[in-house]
Image (spheres, rainbow, N blue to C red):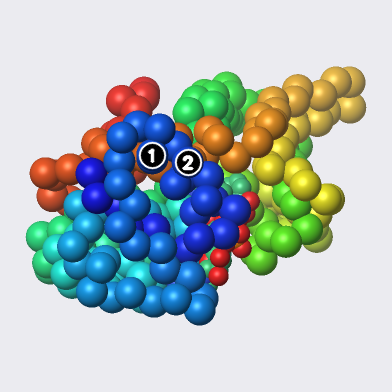
Amino acid sequence: MKIALLGYGRMGKMIEKIAISRNHEIIAKVDVNNSDDVAITKADVAIDFSIPSAAFNNIKHCLENNVPVISGTTGWLDKYNEAVSICNENKGAFIYASNFSLGVNVFFELNEYLAKMMKNLSQYKVSMEEIHHTQKQDAPSGTAITLAEGIIKNTENTGWKLEEAQENEIPITALREPEVPGTHSISYKSDVDTIDIKHTAHNREGFALGAVIAAEWIQRKTGVFSMKDVLNLG
Ligand SMILES: NC(=O)c1ccc[n+]([C@@H]2O[C@H](COP(=O)([O-])OP(=O)(O)OC[C@H]3O[C@@H](n4cnc5c(N)ncnc54)[C@H](O)[C@@H]3O)[C@@H](O)[C@H]2O)c1
Ligand SMILES: O=C(O)C1=N[C@H](C(=O)O)CCC1
């Protein structure tokens, strides 16, 4: 495949490495200082790992030019429904995932399964912690938001909050520490015990491999998909 990389930072560079190892060709590298709108239109797929303020326009440009797009950028989801409409209007192909790693997508399923079991056990209070590197622009992480949505869907919790949560809201603690690729923990605490589940990324390879697999999977497809479709989970 001919791939356009939208964002050539930590993730863009890791995706380039994995894509080349799977015999793909990188035909455009778009960055804050380097835009190449023409090259993008010649790609079989674009992979966007940019910044929250750029993601929506990147995705729109691809969909309006019939280029399937995979986006892992977090922190722009107020415009997700608009991106879905643009995809459908243009009969395009689009996948957003807050986390492309196989391990986290298994963890998403485990989270929902546990939430269902905890639904009627009101003595347990749920909380979440995420830890990422200090360059991260958004908080809480996109992954933490997906996990919170998985709990809300399956329990009486009505929302999530960073820190000071109300009753029935999931409190999320977002910590920033040097070099941490991404750690997410969910705890259900009662007076007598605690149940914890945790996912720890050791590096960024899992995210990048998942994004390249999604880019391979979406070829010749039309519609809006998720990593659940790609990985055939659940
Ligand atoms: N979904 C996942 O699996 C996953 C995994 C890791 C990171 N992320 C997300 O991916 C994004 C990128 O992460 P990163 O660690 O590579 O960040 P980074 O800061 O290393 O890279 C972002 C790059 O985007 C570039 N950029 C800025 N404006 C742009 C524009 N208009 N068009 C294209 N590129 C532009 C920047 O110059 C920079 O090189 C973040 O939102 C992060 O949360 C998602
Ligand atoms: O490094 C980041 O930034 C990450 N962002 C995603 C998120 O916000 O969940 C995935 C994990 C790494």
Quarter of the figure that contains the N terminus: top left
Q: Is residue 57 left or right of residue 141?
A: left
The residue at the point 75 percent across, 25 percent down is 196
The residue at the point 20 percent across, 52 percent down is 44
Residues under numbered marks 1 and 2 in contact, where contact means CB atoms less than 8 Å apart:
yes
Distance of label 1 from label 2 (alpha carbons): 5 Å
Q: Is residue 167 left or right of residue 206?
A: right
Q: Amino acid at mark 2?
A: Lys
Which x, y percent locates residue 226?
A: 33, 43
Q: Disc 1 on helix, strand or loop?
A: helix
* Residue at the limit of the structure toward the right, as seen here: 191
Which x, y percent locates residue 200?
A: 69, 31
Q: Is residue 89 left or right of residue 53?
A: left
Q: Amino acid at mark 1?
A: Ile
Where residue 24 sits, quadrant-wise, is top left
The residue at the point 72 percent across, 61 percent down is 135
Residue identifier under label 1: 20
Quarter of the figure that contains the C terminus: top left
Residue identifier under label 2: 17
Where residue 110 sits, quadrant-wise, is top right
Q: Is residue 112 visible?
A: no
Q: Is residue 47 visible?
A: yes
The residue at the point 80 percent across, 54 percent down is 176
